[in-house]
Amino acid sequence: MNAATTPAGHSSADAHDVAAAAERRWAWIVAVIIALLVAMMVFTGIKWAAMPPSRVETIDPRTLHISGEFVESNLGTTIGPDGRVVSRLIAQQYSFEPQCIVVPAGMPVTFRATSTDVVHGFIVGTTNANTMLVPGFVATFTTTFQRPGEHLMPCHEYCGTGHEAMWARVQVLPAQEFMKRAARGEKVTCVRR
Ligand code: CUA
């Protein structure tokens, strides 16, 4: 409509300039948005790569065997003073300690585990108990096993040449049977002696 009221040559040159300016403006806006998105990706990527997620509990892998929570006599499943069932284990190239873990059915069980050497994996059969065991950090996982039975617990992080031979067993006992064994105060395991 405007083209009819102004000289034809002028109008198309002006319109071209206006369009070019608008395009440049939008190109800048889009460039800034893309730069912001890339910056966010780089920032979050570096942040998550540099920090283990959530509640962090550290431990010195060099003194694990000598003192503290993960000495051999303290590994296995116990009922804590607060009545919670806690199962402690360690992973090392190429085994878990204890090799056979006993837990009760139908009660929340908290696993506390760590590694003495490299990164190992922790997964119990087809349950949702699944985490990484990283040297220097204590991994915790709380889950409830619905039915008594037995699960395999393979290492699922490649940890060296013996990786595929690294696994343990988890025996889920009826709650009463477990309580009877745990009541004696000892650490319950199903390792054959
Ligand atoms: Cu330990 Cu794979």
Image (tube, helix red, strand yellow):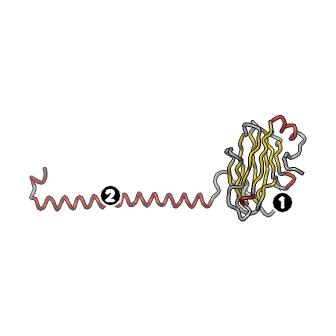
Q: Secondary structure at mark 1?
A: loop
Is residue 119 or residue 11 the one in the foreground? 119
Q: Secondary structure at mark 2?
A: helix
Residue 26, which numbered label? 2
In front: label 2 or label 1: 1
- Quadrant for residue 176, please give it: top right
Above or below, comparing residue 111 to residue 91 in the picture: above
Q: Give the left or right position of residue 143, taking residue 99 as reference.
A: left
Q: Is residue 84 something that shows in the picture?
A: no
Q: Where in the figure is residue 98, as x and y percent of width and height? A: 82, 52
* Mark 2 close to ligand 1, CB under 8 Å: no
Q: Give the left or right position of residue 177, taking residue 162 as reference.
A: right
Which residue in the protein does label 1 denote?
65
- Quadrant for residue 158, please give it: bottom right
Residue 124, which numbered label? none
Q: Give the left or right position of residue 166, taking residue 1 as reference.
A: right
Q: Residue at x 83, y 44 (%)?
A: 78
Mark 2 belongs to which amino acid? Answer: Trp
**Mark with earlier residue (2, 1):** 2
Q: Where in the figure is residue 42, as x and y percent of width and height? A: 52, 61
Q: Where in the figure is residue 173, as x and y percent of width and height? A: 80, 39
Crowding at mark 2 (Cα within 10 Å: few <14, some 14-19, many 20+): few
Mark 1 belongs to which amino acid? Answer: His
Q: Residue at x 85, y 55 (%)?
A: 72
Q: Where in the figure is residue 27, as x and y percent of width and height? A: 33, 60
Q: CA distance from mark 2 to mark 1?
A: 63 Å
Q: Is residue 13 something that shows in the picture?
A: yes
Furthest toward the front, the residue is 165
Crowding at mark 1 (Cα within 10 Å: few <14, some 14-19, many 20+): some
Is residue 117 or residue 44 the one in the foreground? 117
Q: Residue at x 60, y 60 (%)?
A: 49
